[in-house]
Amino acid sequence: MVSTYVSYLSVARNLNASLSSVASQATVSRDSAYYKENIDKVTTVDEFMGDYKLYSYAMKAYGLDDMTYAKAFMKKVLESDLSDSSSFANSLSDGRYAEFAAAFKFGGETKTAQSDVQRDNLLDAYEESFDTEADDIADETDYFEDNISSITSVDEFLSSSRLKNYALTAFGLSTEYTSSSFLKQVLTSDLDDADSFVNQLGDDVYVSLARAFNFNEDGSTDGDLMSEDQISLVSSAYAVASSTIASTETGEAYDTYFAAEIGNITSVDQLMSDDKLVGYLRIAYGLSDDESDSYISAALKSADIAEAIGLSDLHDAFNFDEDGALADGDTAQTSNQTATTTAAFDENYQVLVANASTEDATDNYTTRIASVTSIDDFLVSNDDDDDDDNDDLPELWEMALRAYIDPDSVSRSEVRKILESDPADSKSYVNSLDDDRFVAFRKAFNFDDNGDVTVPLQAMSESVVDDYAAYYKQNKIRYLEGDELTEATDAANDEITYFREQMATITTASEFLADDRLVSFALEAKGLDPDDVTSDELEKMFSSDLDDEDSYVNKLDDNRFGELVGSFNFDQDGNISADPTGTVQQRGDVLETIDSYVRLTLEDDQGDSNTGVRLALYFARKAPEISNAYDILGDSALFEFFTTTFNLSSYVSNMDVDKQAEMVDNFIDMKDLSDPDKVDDLIQRFTAMYDMANGTGTTSSALSILTGSATISADTLLAVAQLKSS
């Protein structure tokens, strides 16, 4: 009779051929095809368990076929929240149940308006936008101040779009719709001639613009185009017009502009036509944005109205009559009045600077976005939500837009149209805008065609990321204790954080493969050595068609590579796609289930002829996953392997469990289980002892000396001769 070890070797030495042979069996092939084709149609536990072919297939794949009858029990397992350590599956001592539950996502992926990474990236971009704004203002001002003195004609000035747009922005004029021919007439007008082009426009803004430059009527200049005071006026006006958050620099620019312009004001109407001056007065005299400009205008003209609406200080700071004009010889403000207004502005503006921190805005965003379930929710104003303390904070959509685009350039109705668009559809509204910023804005959110939140589309679904994080950490800390365990845990946590954050940003297989740190993490999570696979091989794997049996990855000896590729939501071209994501199982989990089913079928088939071979194959498969003695004690098959290997009585199971664990550690160094050669040594010893205990094979005097029993076969004697003493 052939010994157990020889029978084991006949399978194990060409394991892939053995597995292929089993997989090609008519029944196995048919059942595997059925599972692969139909598991994607299942959406609930009841549907899954109601399809006996699917359910029994999966139960066998995870070594639980003896529990297939216990549907109520298994339903509780599948409905367990594995993130809760006290959940039903996690509370069971047999780890196979938690492993089974982890292979299915009956709770579904979490639907959310934004994943944590999407939200954090948006808020980081939002906060960075203020630094970018300040840098841009400084850069444009430096350019204007460095180059304006070299301009010698109006045509030269207008031909420089950067200088021209700077001036237009400073005075609140459109850089897109203000024509150069029109500007030329404005800038070359004689301000002292009531009939000149600019004076006939009846718009004080254009008068202020013309006054800021010294062009002659023929467009030439006499010496410097601008004095230092004129440059200071324009640069301060630009800073005020371009700033969207209070800062010390903006406050100083406001003061400079007010001091330069207030002396040119001759009427209330002229003052009210200048948004920057009106804004200055609002801050100085404590007017909110909700209060109409007409309040300011009325208070400037009438002492009685000013008193009635509480703006007497504003009225007293100016010298306008009830018609909004100035008496002959009067100015809009005396120097003392200007000083009073400036002091009031500076005091109030410092409060705005102190409150300009983005912390409250980002906290509000984080709180509100977590409860958003639709685009409608997202577009609800702070004024209309349940929080009365956030009314003065930026709206959600304003903050989101600012992270990518100028929020003033997009209306709320356009925001809705963008968020309802499919960024993967080249003909969608967002893609019709032909601006990558809008696409980036759209991709920062997870709304479906109906405007409801959906699962974030990532290169690797979040539940699969969770699985890989768990596998990676287990592999990194296995067998470690004390300081080594602490250090390895900290290092693993750092890598897990990096993997989570980066996988949320990956959109193509090429991006993933270009990051060696991500690739190494994924390979090690699957128990694969990154040094054993080249970049070229990985590229071939990720460009393989998993549905084609003859594709590169499916022809590899190690099925874990196919499972790895299947864990990603990439199409065959390497682009992120919703098609491969699956429902209750990702492609990688489906492949892992099928591979496991074939492997267990092989073990069962061998067990029909020789239980020892099944146990040896089972131990060879499980050994790399064993972390401690309790893993052996909690698995009946592993425990039988252990007691047989060391010729121990089954009664040791009656001992205190900690004593049992101590005994296991005395016999087996757990670190040896990661060494294939030492695993094989244990299997040789097991098969020899199994043959002796079960009377298989012939006997020899050598083994009789070891065990005090009858003779065994020559090939068993060979196995014993190869054993290392424990």
Image: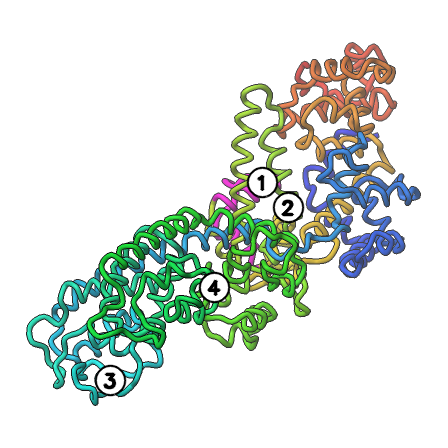
Instruction: State how many labels appear.
Output: 4
| Mark 2–mark 1 CB contact (< 8 Å) | yes
Residue indicated by mark 3: 199
Residues in magenta, as a range: 517-543
Please name the predominant secondary structure of the magenta segment in the image: helix
| Mark 1–mark 3 CB contact (< 8 Å) | no
Q: Earlier in the sequence, mark 3 or mark 4?
A: 3
Q: Residue 533 colored magenta?
A: yes
- Assign a secondary structure to mark 2: helix
Residue indicated by mark 4: 308
Horizontal and vertical percent position of residue 252 = 28, 54
Q: Could you tell me if residue 724 is visible in this image?
A: yes
| Mark 1–mark 4 CB contact (< 8 Å) | no
- Assign a secondary structure to mark 1: loop
| Mark 3–mark 4 CB contact (< 8 Å) | no
Residue indicated by mark 1: 528
Residue indicated by mark 2: 560
Query: Which amino acid lies under the numbered mark 4 shown in the image of this protein?
Result: Ala
Farthest residue, direction right: 69
How busy is the neighbourhood of tag 3: few (under 14 within 10 Å), some, or many (20 plus)?
A: some
Q: Residue at x 52, y 38 (%)?
A: 495
Closer-to-camera residue (175/159): 175
Mark 4 to mark 2 CA distance (whole Å): 80 Å
- Assign a secondary structure to mark 4: helix
How busy is the neighbourhood of tag 1: few (under 14 within 10 Å), some, or many (20 plus)?
A: some
Q: Earlier in the sequence, mark 4 or mark 2?
A: 4
Q: Please identify the quarter of the rendering in which residue 225 is found.
A: bottom left
Q: Earlier in the sequence, mark 3 or mark 2?
A: 3
